Image: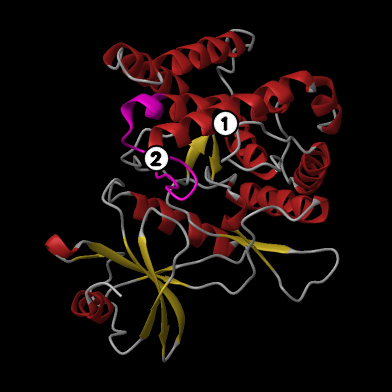
Amino acid sequence: MGDEAVIRRALAAFEREDATVTPIGVGNIHTTYGASARDGEFILQRVNPIFAPGIHENILAVTEHLAAKGLATLRLVPTRGGQSTVDLGGDGIWRLLTRIPGASYDVCPGAAHARAAGALVARFHGALVDLAHTFEPLGIVWHHLPTYLEELDAALARHLNAALHADVASLADRLRALIAEWPSVADLPARVVHTDLKFNNLLFDPEAGDPPMATSLIDLDTVCRLPLYVELGDAWRSWCNRSGEDAALAEFDMGTFVAAAQGYLGDLAFDLTEDEHASLVLALERMSVELAVRFAADVLADSYFGWKPELFASRAEHNLIRARGQLSLAEQARDVRPQLASALGL
């Protein structure tokens, strides 16, 4: 279970050194433990150093605002000195979070859960629409397609002799052809968004029955201000592909999309601008392409994304399948743009 002495030092900083600790194998960014203490259940994490320290100022601002609006939310537990994290030098930066009860799902179970998920995201956005906070940088390039395209071009130029170079070059041409079809999305409002809405970052009330009730969002490291199409497109990209990210051929589920869109728009407490609303039609397509570009670059760079050696011969082969799958999803979304617009009330 890692270095027990380090874990105890981290817990002592939060005045919970006697907590019972259990490793949690969910996620691959931070090292995460469940911590059961005398005053409740917590999540203890060694924070991945790719993130800037300022993300905790963002989390504090967002969670305080959510709590003030009556939404269930995780909270950062302060150290004995009132800090959000404790720096143990070579043993890392650690934080303690309150643990929110609820059920989570790696894959969206169906339309009812998609509708509930969309409604929760709308409540999250609505609660934060009036948040006055200047967000600190995340420390990573996040949802910026021009940078990702530059990285893909650099990888193609740098790895001319790579075994899969021709495959990636062909993918790059198809991705750029799709991008060339898109209208500009300049001058859209920047909303306070979560930006990592994979389905297991939403918690559901296990006692709610039918219909399900989504109760809270977790994993708030990437909260920031971005256009809504980025947030919702990435959510729909994840929720609506029945094949998942390890298949070369996506399976777009229109029923899940319709339910999620209806849940979101039905619970949204502020008005979208005309251009903002229209941008949602291509949102899933845009974000699938963005991720395909990132996977394609890593086919050649072979350094960033984790991979499944039990399923694939190499990281490069896994990323090639992932890139093809995301391109397949984008092309399927392109082919049903009128139906997407109808589902969005456009």
Residue 99 % position (x, y): 50, 73
Instruction: Say which of 267 and 145 sits in front.
Output: 145
Residue 280 % position (x, y): 70, 28
In the drawing, does residue 288 fall left or right of residue 275? Answer: left
Residue 105 % position (x, y): 64, 60
Residue lying at 52% horizontally and 27% vertically, measured from the top left: 292
Please say if 142 is above or below 74: above
Secondary structure of the residue carrying tag 1 is loop
Residue 284 % position (x, y): 66, 30
Confirm whether the magenta stretch covers residue 306. yes
Give the mark nearer the N terminus: 1 vs 2. 1
Instruction: Say which of 272 and 237 sits in front.
Output: 237
| Residues tagged 1 and 2 counted as in contact (Cβ below 8 A) | no
Question: What is the span of residues highlighted in magenta in the rendered image?
Answer: 297-313
Q: Amino acid at mark 2?
A: Phe
Structural crowding at the residue carrying mark 1, measured as other residues with C-alpha within 10 Å and reported as few (<14), some (14–19) or many (≥20): some
The total number of labels drawn is 2
Structural crowding at the residue carrying mark 2, measured as other residues with C-alpha within 10 Å and reported as few (<14), some (14–19) or many (≥20): few
Disc 2: which residue: 305
Measure the alpha-carbon separation of dots 1 and 2: 25 Å
* Res 306 label: none
Residue lying at 30% horizontally and 75% vertically, measured from the top left: 1
Q: Amino acid at mark 1?
A: Pro
Secondary structure of the residue carrying tag 2 is loop
Please say if 40 is above or below 54: below
Whether residue 18 is visible here, answered yes or no, is yes
Disc 1: which residue: 227
Whether residue 144 is visible here, answered yes or no, is no
Please say if 114 is above or below 183: below
Please tell me whether mark 1 or mark 2 is closer to you in this view: 2
Residue lying at 55% horizontally and 15% vertically, measured from the top left: 175
